Image: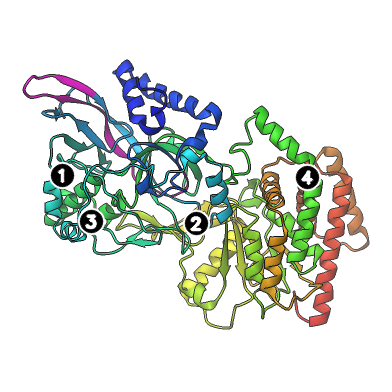
Amino acid sequence: MPCVGDWLNSPLSIVQGIFAQNAPNSDWEKKVTEYFKEKLKENNATNWVPSLNDVPVHYLKPNSLVKFRCMVQDMFDPEFYMGVYETVDPNTNARVLHFGKYRDVAECGPQQEIDLNSPQTVTSERQTFYCVPVPGESAWVKEISFLTEPVQARVSPSTSYTPSRHKRSYEEDEDMDLHPSKQKEQHMGKSCLQILCFSGSGGDIHGCVEPKRLETEASAGHHVISPNCSPPLDLNFPLPGEKGPACLVKIYESWESFKVNDVLEVFGVLSVDPVLSIVNSEERDSSSLDPMECMDTMEEQRVHSPPASLVPRIHVILAQKLQHINPLLPACLNEEESKTCEFVSNFMSELSPVRAELLGFLTHALLGDSLAAEYLILHLISTVYGRRDVLPLGKFTVNLSGCPRSSTFTEHLYRLIQQLVPASYHLRMSIESMNHSRFIPHKDYTANRLVSGLLQLASNTSLVIDETQLEQGQLDTAGVHNVTALGNLITWQKVDYDFNYHRMEFPCNINVLITSEGRSLLPSDCQVHLQPQIIPPNMEEYMSSLLTAVLPSVLNKFRIYLSLLRLLDYSISDEVTKAVEEDFVEMRKNNPESVTADDLHKMLLVARFLSLSAGQTTLSRERWLRAKQLEALRKARLQQQQCVNGNEL
């Protein structure tokens, strides 16, 4: 077998060695997975694997091991492929057994042909996910993830894979694009290669062509002009202006454990073979001549088989669902590993000063309002921890009313929040954006794909909705649907995806903060009226100075604090539960209407997050009294503001 260093640069060589030693026994697949799992456990080896999040695909060596942190945007139909196939030399009749797993293209040597009728052929099944970078991922997440990798793992042009071919001139490239048949002719060579997979709906295994490495760099935008395709290729990112690669992720085991919108980290073999684009182009040409020969539409073929240089393929060896994407935390905090426990215990020991500094930082950001800062901390560590029937438990949408309308306060507040949370999005509410934006993902049956929308977000994304710039106007049908979708997201933590003939509920876990001048048009769990203690003459300068005044090490502690506390378990003892019930009865004695069941629920929610914010996983009497105090202050402020304005808040 190859030396140990080859598992990074030539993982297929490792697979070939294991296959040769164990085939035709089916255990070879399990041994491959175990081999790479052990390798990635050694000395933080995961950091040595180049990441598609950090390195442009054209800098990476084809068929090398890569990793990708991504969200499952769509799931395509399962596809069948030749898991094991046999080649034969027509002259000598010599036969060789090959594996097709982790490959798009089947290779066979000179003078060899694939025997499609061989009894040794094994047809297997795999699932294809269309994956995109985590929507709204903060710049600091990308930067820290990149900096934690060893220098050797940061592929640069000088150390990158360099094709052995000579570069063509621009005129030659243009001629190839205009005349694909010439490109095909240049690819017909010595070795026979065949596409290994065919869709579950039927289809042929394609003919023989030889791949050639291309050095095309994919654009970072939403739309990419693809060779041989007249319309632009939509990378289907949920949020506008997103950058990064979209990938077709091929899953071989346990794909039923993953679902749409899950955040994954996958390790697998990078496939960017240009032969895929050529064959798919030929397939579209042939199907246009005789539509009856192919069940897939041209649009579906274009979307499901984009050029590999623009949408690379990753054949997954290992995949894990991520609890979070904060690179400052261990990837998985469920495992009782000594290092993980040590990390948590060390941080929890210094939690109190971190909370105090964060409270001070947010108080300044909220123009000196410490009460609003307290509630913002509770909001930022809130998460849906369970569901009772249709009711999501743990959501804590805050409406921050009283925000200055004439200034860019919300914009700058969002920039500060963006520096604290791993993923976020700023939604500027206006009549135009409501009427013309696509909030709800919908199914495109022509292309057989899920078209993304603004509300297709990963769990624990912070969504900041700005109502301060909302003007009077008329919402059209699309605008009404979008506002309804926002209301459902806030109230039920679900988005109803549009499948034309029906709607399908997709549960979510999105932290929503609404800034408004008066009471928000949208529902919320808690309204906090902002009372600025200072009015800075230059809002941008004031907010920027807050960030520059915070040391990077302190900022990282804030980031760990907010992410870690979301993952902690919480419980209430029977003794405290009884005390809370007695307290509730006592509060209702004098004025039964003063405290309702909803008020009790809200106080318990505030008490929960107050306890967690102090690092306590159980409710104490002290935290319960503090929660009651905060709620009393918040309500008194709302009553005061109502008296001043004479309006309902």
Q: Which residue is mark 1?
A: 187
Which mark's residue is nearer the viewer, 3 or 1? 1
Residue closest to the eye, 346 or 31: 346
Q: Residues within 10 Å of mark 4 (few under 14, many from 20)?
A: some
Q: Earlier in the sequence, mark 3 or mark 2?
A: 3
Q: In screen coordinates, is 368 left or right of 285?
A: right
Which mark's residue is nearer the viewer, 4 or 3? 4
Q: Position of residue 231 (x, y in %)?
A: 27, 64
Q: Which residue is mark 4?
A: 351
Task: Give the CA distance from mark 2 to mark 1.
Answer: 40 Å
Queried whether the magenta region covers residue 90, the answer comes back as: yes
The three-letter amino acid code for the residue at tag 2 is: Gln
The three-letter amino acid code for the residue at tag 3 is: Met
Residue at the image point whose x is 75% and y is 37% from the top: 346
Q: Which residue is mark 3?
A: 298
Magenta part of the protein: which range? 68-97
Q: Which residue is mark 2?
A: 456
Q: Is residue 322 visible?
A: yes
The three-letter amino acid code for the residue at tag 1 is: His
Where's the N terminus, which quadrant? top left
Task: Give the CA distance from mark 3 to mark 2.
Answer: 26 Å
Q: Earlier in the sequence, mark 4 or mark 2?
A: 4
